[in-house]
Image: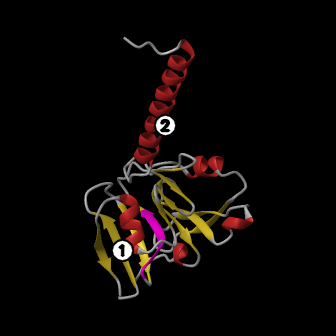
Amino acid sequence: MYRLPRQLLIIAIGIIAALTTIALTVFSVRAQTSLSEQSKLAINGIGPVRVGMTVPQAAAATGVSLVVHYAGSDNCYYLRPQDVPKDLAFMVVDNQIVRVDIESGSQIKTVSGAKIGDSEARIKSLYPGQIRVTNHEYIEGGHYLTFIPKDPADKNYRLVFETGVDGQVTTFRSGKLPEVQYIEGCA
């Protein structure tokens, strides 16, 4: 029976441990790149989907089918994941993702932790000095709270929270200018 020298055995165990760690890390990263209720909305996308992706790129990145939710026109329409997460829609203009809408009932949060049901005060505390408040176009007493980024690289993006008369977030969205500010979406 042949015995490996002790040093070689230690090296072999080390290599096996390193390969196991790499495999687990790759699996963990893949799990984070899927689209789910645990995905976090950023100023420029959600989960693996980034503003500027084409529809085929977004579908490939999510690994789920994206289906038409609302067809405003040939140039502007909304897609949803076929299954989950619910209450999430992608605005598409000229075959590119330009905006992500999170609708009432969703459990999705922003990268900073903002969510449906948060108060205006909480939103302002999560983004101190970066929220512009304007009156809601259709809800008297409601507001649009618009996050304006300080980083020059993000100057063409916004995060917009809509609140009702009770001061609670009812919907929010992120994306590029000017589409992220369209009040009626593709209408």
Q: Would you say the residues marked 1 and 2 are in contact, meaning their CB atoms lie under 8 Å apart? A: no
Secondary-structure class at tag 2 = helix
Residue 78's disc number: 1
- Answer few, some or many: residues within 10 Å of disc 1's Cα (few below 14, many 20 plus, some between 14 and 19): many
Amino acid found under the numbered disc labelled 2: Ile
Q: Quadrant of the C terminus?
A: bottom left
Looking at the image, which residue is at 52% across and 77% down?
A: 179
Residue 22's disc number: 2
Horizontal side of residue 64 vs 39, given as left or right: left
Compared with 121, 8 (above or below) is above
The reply to whether residue 5 is visible in this rendering is: yes
Residue 69's disc number: none
Q: Which is in the foreground here, disc 1 or disc 2?
A: 2
Q: Where is residue 72 in the image (x, y as percent from the top left)?
A: 35, 83
Looking at the image, which residue is at 31% across and 56% down?
A: 86
Q: Considering depth in this image, is 104 or 69 the residue closer to the camera?
A: 69
What's the magenta region? 95-101
Compared with 38, 51 (above or below) is below
The residue positioned farthest toward the bottom in the image shown: 74
Secondary-structure class at tag 1 = strand
Looking at the image, which residue is at 53% across and 20% down?
A: 8
Q: Is the magenta stretch mostly helix, strand or loop?
A: strand
The reply to whether residue 38 is visible in this rendering is: no
Looking at the image, which residue is at 51% across and 63% down?
A: 142
Q: Is residue 174 magenta?
A: no
